[in-house]
Image (spheres, helix red, strand yellow):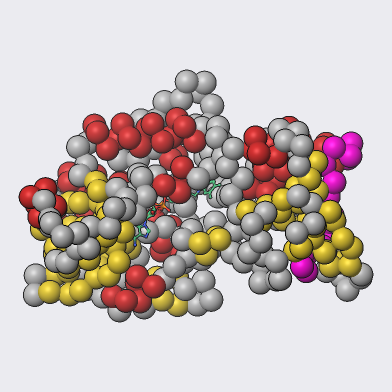
Amino acid sequence: MSTTETETSPEDLAADVSVDVAVIGAGPIGLEVAAALRRAGQDTLNVDRGPIGSQIVDFPPATRWFSGPERIAIAGVPLETTSQEKATREEYLAYLRMVVRLLELPVRTFETVDSVDRSSEGFVLHTRTLAGLDRTIRARTLVLAVGGTASHRRLGIPGEDLPHVRNEVGDPHWGHGRRVLVVGGRNSAADSAIRLWRAGASVTISYRGTEVYPRIKYWIRPELIACIRSGLIEARFGTVPEEITPSGVRLREVDGGGTSFVPADDVLLQIGYAADGAIFESIGCRLEGDDRAVVHDPETMETSVPGVHVAGTAVAGTQGRFQVYIENSHVHADRIAAALTGAAPPPNPELPELPEA
Ligand SMILES: Cc1cc2nc3c(=O)[nH]c(=O)nc-3n(C[C@H](O)[C@H](O)[C@H](O)COP(=O)(O)OP(=O)(O)OC[C@H]3O[C@@H](n4cnc5c(N)ncnc54)[C@H](O)[C@@H]3O)c2cc1C
């Protein structure tokens, strides 16, 4: 082990551990896998480069899930909401913290897995803490529950890296008194546009589709349509950004028509995420297709590398439209636990009608 520190404290040395199963990722499914494995008698450790549920931390405050609480509850622990409505971001994060405490799941947060080596006993994970300490985790089996939202999709146009271009809305408070161009037409873009307008922004949406996307959350869509019809939010349908400048955005009509310039103080890109397959490839796991989905055995979730399993949204690589998400990933935990203990794989669950993220 090497560190950039001149001294390594006893706590840091003790931080190099051996476990049966290392789970990379402490999102909902990484935690659910750990819970299933511990029930099956395995010693586990989750390691995450952020806090637990870090993807959800990035949701704007008070965002409601589109799934009912019972569908995103993990490890058999009920999720109750104060309103009996769909859970908010805050309720779900509190729930995840509670699950970790209740089930006593060992988790290391703010520790990134930089690389993985093979050893005679399995795998050695080389990690780095937020403060820059290097650590190792030895494990017989590895589960990658690393999600599919490592980075934001890019438009690939001039001006995209200017400082007033954002990918996350965060707390919409910043929009007060600003002219904001929101790019995108799905749930996140629609939700952000309405919330920014309510926070006092003057909002324009640029969306390549010719009308409001039909599969937006049923409680957001009518509101967005009403805002557009009454002129509270301006919609430029059938357009894509061509260039972002410090004073606005040049939009091009997708049907081959002309261009127009929309003055904007801020540009919010809500065009989806891209997965990072690098960690899979570094271990030798096969990825396939344009989405770079992880090749795996659907009964055991084992990848093309023996001893390396995949769980959660990571399975699907980059998802243009969420097809794999929490609701239909719960079974991954039981499949991996069954595979490791030699039990029969669980039956395929009856999948609910899949809404869209
Ligand atoms: C706006 C939005 C709304 C959504 N609504 C719903 C919904 O209503 N219902 C539903 O079922 N799903 C929904 N989803 C999808 C859901 O949030 C994700 O599917 C869920 O977070 C996936 O869980 P996961 O455990 O597979 O991955 P993630 O939650 O993405 O967790 C992966 C974790 O791995 C960590 N990680 C990655 N690489 C490393 C590394 N090298 N070292 C250490 N840690 C690493 C990351 O920090 C992250 O915490 C929504 C998604 C979005 C974006």
Residue most extreme to the right: 258
- Which of the 4 image quarters holds residue 340? bottom left
In the rendered image, residue 168, in percent from the top left (x then y), is placed at 59, 49
Query: Which span is picked out in magenta?
Result: 229-243
Quarter placement of the N terminus: bottom left
The question of residue 97 being in magenta is answered with: no
Q: Residue at x 76, y 63 (%)?
A: 245
Picture quarter containing residue 132? bottom left
Q: Left or right? Give the position of 110 relative to 45.
A: right
Position of residue 313 measured from the top left corner of the image (x, y, whole percent): 43, 57
| Residue at the spot 56% in from the left edge and 61% down from the top edge | 152
- Identify which residue is drawn at 20% across, 51% down: 45
Q: Is residue 238 magenta?
A: yes
21 versus 196 height, above or below: below
Q: Main secondary structure of the magenta part?
A: strand
Which quadrant of the figure has residue 113?
A: bottom left
